[in-house]
């Protein structure tokens, strides 16, 4: 690829803009993390930030504003106190700082977790569902970013996260159980893109799944997943 190709040059310029924070006109906070960003970049890609930065007119203005951004120039994203476990479901009102960091990274780089994804090592099928690997790992990050793309109205992030999740799942089961819970607690039932990836993988490895306590327990607890697997077994669409 030519070094003068405009797309890489544009991405390089956007990355440099994020790093320098030059011309920043918006601040995003999550806990103690502070990001100096640019409305033209974040609002053009995210429906959430577009609405947060919207200026109301006349009688439409109120004390709430849109996250009070119009008055303060800051969008505060509440920090979740439950950043290491999703066993109790998805916190719809708060985020873990790492997910916010990756979201903002995506808005300037059109990618996230580049280095981590490259480190995935292929595992045999029998190794994919080992209990010690199912609770933590790369699949959790991809599932979270899918959920973030959906929640913050960033279609590109949502699509990329699904692709990365699907690709990673061919090689590793690291974080699968938590990723399953995220997929089935962070999105509405009509949003099936990530869920179908999980259903297809589990259906193709049912004997391993049902003999793996953590996976089996998650299937029992996630009724929508159990129902989708049942329909898949009988050749019905989901």
Image (tube, helix red, strand yellow):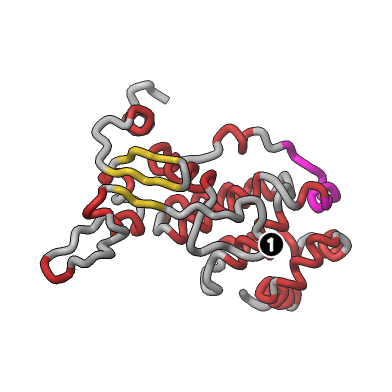
Q: Nearer the viewer, residue 155 or 16?
A: 16
Instruction: Give the quarter of the image for residue 18.
Output: top left
Rendered residue at 13%/71% (across/down): 59
* Count of numbered circles on the image: 1
The C terminus sits in image quarter: bottom right
Q: Which residue is mark 1?
A: 87
Point out residue 153 in the picture as x, y percentages from the top left corner: 40, 59
**Residue 138: % across, % down:** 65, 45
Q: Is residue 8 above or below residue 166?
A: above
Rendered location of residue 54, percent (x, y)? 23, 58
Q: Is residue 203 left or right of residue 105?
A: right
| For residue 209, side relative to residue 142 (left or right) | right
- Res 235 seen here: no
Residue 14 at what x, y percent from top left?
A: 34, 33
In magenta segment, residue 125: yes
Which is more toward the observer, 85 or 108? Answer: 85
Name the quarter where the N terminus is drawn: top left
Q: Residue furthest right?
A: 211
Determine if the magenta segment contains residue 213: no
Q: Residue at horizontal 61%, vertical 38%?
A: 117
Most extreme residue toward the left is 58
Bounds of the magenta span?
121-131
The answer to whether residue 75 is above or below residue 8 is: below
* Along the viewing direction, whichever of 150 and 23 lies nearer the viewer: 23
| Residue at the extreme top | 3
Q: For numbered disc 1, what is the local secondary structure? A: loop
Position of 27 relative to 214 (above/below): above
């Amino acid at each position: 690829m030519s070094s003068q190709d405009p797309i890489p040059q544009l991405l390089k310029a956007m990355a440099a803009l994020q790093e320098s924070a030059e011309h920043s006109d918006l601040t995003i906070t999550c806990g103690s993390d502070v990001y100096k960003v640019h409305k033209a970049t974040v609002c053009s890609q995210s429906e959430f930030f577009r609405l947060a930065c919207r200026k109301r007119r006349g009688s439409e203005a109120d004390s709430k504003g849109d996250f009070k951004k119009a008055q303060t120039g800051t969008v505060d994203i509440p920090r979740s106190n439950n950043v290491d476990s999703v066993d109790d479901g998805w916190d719809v009102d708060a985020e873990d700082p790492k997910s916010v960091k990756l979201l903002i990274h995506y808005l300037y780089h059109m990618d996230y977790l580049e280095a981590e994804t490259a480190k995935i090592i292929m595992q045999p099928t029998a190794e994919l569902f080992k209990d010690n690997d199912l609770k933590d790992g790369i699949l959790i990050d991809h599932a979270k970013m899918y959920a973030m793309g959906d929640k913050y109205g960033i279609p590109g992030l949502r699509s990329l996260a699904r692709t990365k999740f699907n690709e990673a799942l061919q090689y590793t089961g690291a974080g699968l159980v938590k990723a399953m819970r995220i997929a089935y607690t962070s999105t509405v039932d009509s949003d099936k893109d990530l869920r179908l990836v999980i259903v297809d993988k589990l259906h193709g490895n049912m004997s391993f799944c049902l003999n793996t306590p953590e996976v089996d327990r998650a299937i029992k607890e996630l009724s929508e997943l159990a129902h989708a697997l049942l329909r898949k077994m009988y050749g019905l669409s989901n």
